[in-house]
Amino acid sequence: MSDPRTPERPGSRTATAARRTLRTAARRIMRFAVSLAVLLVASFAMIHLIPGDPVRASLGPAAPIELVEARTAALGLDRPLPEQLITYVGDVLTGDFGTSFLTGEAVGDVIAARLPNTLALALLATALALIVAVPLGMWAAVRTENGRNRGTELAFGTVTGTAVAVPEFLYSIALVAVLAVGLGWFPPAGKAGPLTYVLPVLALSVGPIAMIARITRVETLRELGTDYVRLARAKRLPAARLHLRHVLPNTLTATLTVGGLLLTSLIAGSVLVEYVFAWPGLGLKIVEAITQKDYPVAQAVILVYGAIVLIVNLVVDLVLGALDPTSEIKEVAA
């Protein structure tokens, strides 16, 4: 046992920090694996809880009962659910997501064709949100510092608070009604060129812009109250240089952390936006698969959505843990 009065050597502190970081990473990876296993079982259970017969749905209501029974047996749907679950898990672990009940197409090919479209929307919306929200939040902080410009503070809080509260699909409907149908500036639906990206990306990014701007304003106000900013102002450092070279980097840590987490919510929130804009991504596909009781496609898309969210959260956790080792202490304390 080391004597607490003995000062710790720098090399020992580095090794201790490295061990702590590795333990944190191992714990978070283990948590990710458990969450992924739960998601795998949940995606199977959720689909089988939906009432209705998928075979009857795929063959039509007029299909003879012999054909329905034969198709049910061929797909393995007449076996007990635990047996179906074991088969499903085994297939997924080997990369086999099965084939669509309706089209016979390999589900892996469906996902490979649709996933890039969903990721493109989410990434563009995240980039737009960061580009617009960070300057907006900093501007609002500088304008409202020390209680100045109460009108600006009230307007900023009201507008951003309302924008966060409105769901994405309402933005989608409003954008289609005004910019596509009313003014005719953009195509109302589909994916056929750069202009078709504009409205879905806007619908996805309005809420995140408001949220990140509010966080950036709070972080910027915190930085503007620090001693180094007061010292820089006392030395008459130009405002632009102070804000861009010193305040901005210190506000970005929290902002980018939120931005990373926001990407996961944008991917999940893209389902209704894709449906409104008939965007050929995973969101539109999962709606079609659930309504048509196409079990393999619906299960796989739910699994992919959940896995993306878990992976992004894991990466954010690992990066945050590496940048801020005290997060482990906070986590344990919580």
Image (cartoon, rainbow, N blue to C red):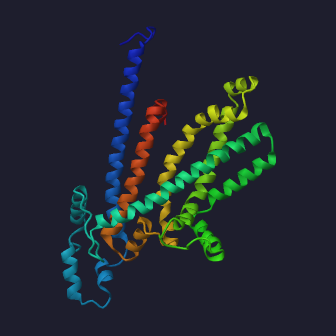
- Which of the 4 image quarters holds residue 41? bottom left
251 and 72: which one is in front?
251
Residue shown at 76%/50% (left/top)?
154
The residue that appears at 71% across and 45% down in the rendered structure is 140
**Can you tell which quarter of the image residue 307 is in?**
bottom left
Quadrant (top left/top right/bottom left/bottom right) for the N terminus: top left
**Count of marks, rendered view:** 0
The spot of residue 234 in percent (x, y) is: 75, 23
Q: Residue at x 47, y 32 (%)?
A: 323
**In the shown orientation, is residue 274 left or right of residue 207?**
left
Nearer-the-camera pick, 248 or 12: 248
The x, y position of residue 185, in whole percent, is 62, 71
- Of residues 102 and 49, the one drawn nearer to the viewer in this rendering: 102
The residue sitting at 59% across, 34% down in the picture is 250
Evaluate whether residue 45 shows in this view: no
Q: Position of residue 88 (x, y in %)?
A: 24, 62
Q: Is residue 6 visible?
A: yes
The image shows residue 10, relative to residue 113, as above or below, that is: above
Dividing the picture into quarters, in which one does residue 74 lie? bottom left
Give the x, y percent position of residue 118: 44, 61
Left or right position of 178 against 48? right
Relative to 96, say whether 131 is above or below. Answer: above
